[in-house]
């Protein structure tokens, strides 16, 4: 997926490293993603969810909080409040350079942060939490044995996920002051809560408290079998798909350009990185998946290349018959086109010019509903061969290929 890397100034004056993941065409919306505690913008869950969302037309901005990843500053000086402020500044940057985020997504403590930041990002229409705690102070359970020492000494280095992090008394005091329940109750945005019932880091009871505190519209999706960090590809893919589908109801659709010529808009096909063959197919504002069947190594998450070819011919055939029937006032109620592709021996085709080897054969069966007489049905069958895609497939086609400039 195309992306832009840049820096913007955080609440402490430090430069924060950011990545803006972009879809192949004009984004339908922009999302701001907040990563989990002590993680970073490039953690697997963040990257994979961003990939899934861009494949569905949503641009995603993810960045490293102070002292993490490639961002400047000391982690020991960061707090939950500074994380919230950095999210607001990230939204400001998007507003100034692109468009303000309409969708806020937060994973783990990042989920608590977007709930708290939403009120300060007026363009945000929808908020998504993934494995989020209902109280930011929940994070202290990760280093419960050190809390007393932190209060007494001012700061202590603790081991989290095998890495050392300095935790300060300032951080503990700050998270203790946040009343997230009140902020959730006054959210005034659509809310989607995603949580695994077997999450052993942030229990499912946190999702319950968030959901109960929120007012409608609100939704809950169980991530059955997923771990806290969403380490499995299938889980992040599912999360991205659910978010994109759910958010459509709340995100402002991109208006169709009056100048857009449907005959000249590009079809863009890009690998998703999921499975061996899966692709995203983008045509203007429309998006779908392509894949191969399981027997040939694919995951069967979408139609295959020849399926799409047959779909194009079938759709064109049906549309052509509809246009002709309306022009001639024929009583055609509905058209159904069934197609099949196969390879046949050329020697078995008496009317074909090719006499050796194999050739492609497309079988097309057209069912027409309505009170049509035999002559009308035959005329419609004859018209089917005049559909533009049929003509393209049976005429000389020239395909040119070049290397992309980027």
Image (cartoon, rainbow, N blue to C red):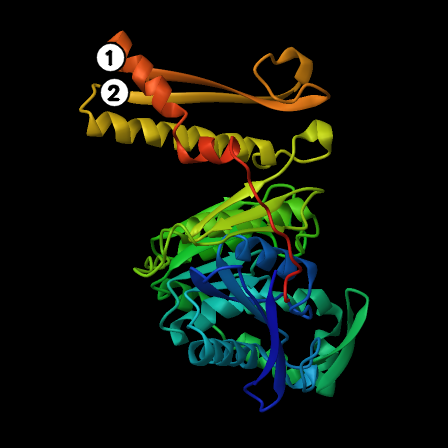
Q: Residues within 10 Å of mark 2 (few under 14, many from 20)?
A: some
Quadrant containing the C terminus is: bottom right
Q: 311 left or right of 65? A: left
Check the image and report above or below for 28 versus 159.
Answer: above
Q: Nearer the viewer, residue 111 or 103?
A: 103
Residue 31 drawn at (x, y percent):
48, 65
Contact between labelled residues 1 and 2, with CB atoms less than 8 Å apart: yes
Q: Helix or strand or loop: what does disc 2 sit on? A: loop
Rendered location of residue 198, percent (x, y): 64, 45
Q: Which residue lies furthest to the left in this view?
A: 329
Q: Which residue is drawn at 36% across and 62% down?
A: 189
Q: Which residue is disc 2 drawn over? A: 332
Relative vertical location of residue 146 with respect to residue 36 in this rendering, above or below = below
| Distance from the alpha carbon under mark 2 to that under mark 1 | 7 Å
Question: Looking at the picture, does residue 347 appear above or below residue 97?
Answer: above
Query: Which image quarter: residue 402?
Result: bottom right
Instruction: List x then y, in percent, for residue 215.
Output: 35, 56
Q: How many marks?
A: 2
Q: Can residue 135 be seen in this view?
A: no
- Direction right: furthest residue: 162
Res 189 label: none
Q: Position of residue 106 (x, y in %)?
A: 54, 63
Q: Is residue 102 above or below residue 217?
A: below
Which residue was labeled with disc 1? 372
> Mark 2 vs mark 1: which is more N-terminal?
2
The residue lying furthest to the bottom in this view is: 13
- In front: 277, or 251? 277
Q: Residue at the location (68% across, 52% down)? A: 200
Q: Is mark 1 on a helix, strand or loop?
A: loop
Image quarter where the N terminus lies is bottom right
Can see residue 192?
A: yes
């Amino acid at each position: 997926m195309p992306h832009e890397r840049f820096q913007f100034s955080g609440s402490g004056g430090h430069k924060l490293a950011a990545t803006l993941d972009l879809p192949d065409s004009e984004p339908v919306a922009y999302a701001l993603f907040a990563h989990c505690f002590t993680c970073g913008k490039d953690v697997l869950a963040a990257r994979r969810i961003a990939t899934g969302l861009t494949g569905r037309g949503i641009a995603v901005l993810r960045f490293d909080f102070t002292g993490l990843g490639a961002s400047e500053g000391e982690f020991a000086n960061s707090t939950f409040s500074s994380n919230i402020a950095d999210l607001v500044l990230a939204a400001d940057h998007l507003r100034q350079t692109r468009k303000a985020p309409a969708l806020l997504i937060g994973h783990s403590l990042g989920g608590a942060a977007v709930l708290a930041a939403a009120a300060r990002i007026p363009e945000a229409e929808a908020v998504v939490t993934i494995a989020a705690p209902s109280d930011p102070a929940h994070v202290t359970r990760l280093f419960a044995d050190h809390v007393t020492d932190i209060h007494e000494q001012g700061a202590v280095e603790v081991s989290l996920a095998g890495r050392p992090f300095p935790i300060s008394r300032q951080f503990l005091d700050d998270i203790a002051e946040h009343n997230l329940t009140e902020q959730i109750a006054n959210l005034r945005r659509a809310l989607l809560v995603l949580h695994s019932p077997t999450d052993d880091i942030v229990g499912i009871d946190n999702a319950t408290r968030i959901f109960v505190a929120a007012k409608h519209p609100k939704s809950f999706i169980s991530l059955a079998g997923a771990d806290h960090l969403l380490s499995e590809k299938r889980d992040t893919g599912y999360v991205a798909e659910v978010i994109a589908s759910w958010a459509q109801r709340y995100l402002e659709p991109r208006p169709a350009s009056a100048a857009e010529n449907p005959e000249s808009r590009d079809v863009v096909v890009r690998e998703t990185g999921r499975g061996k063959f899966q692709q995203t197919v983008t045509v203007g504002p429309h998006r779908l998946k392509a894949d191969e069947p399981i027997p040939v190594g694919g995951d069967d998450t979408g139609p295959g290349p020849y399926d799409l070819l047959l779909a194009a011919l079938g759709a064109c055939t049906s549309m052509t018959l509809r246009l002709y029937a309306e022009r001639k006032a024929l009583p055609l109620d509905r058209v159904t086109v069934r197609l099949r592709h196969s390879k046949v021996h050329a020697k078995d085709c008496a009317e074909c010019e090719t006499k050796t080897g194999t050739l492609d054969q497309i079988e097309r069966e057209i069912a027409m509903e309505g009170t049509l007489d035999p002559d009308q049905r035959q005329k419609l069958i004859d018209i089917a061969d005049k559909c533009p895609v049929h003509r393209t497939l049976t005429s000389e086609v020239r395909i040119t290929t070049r290397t992309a400039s980027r």
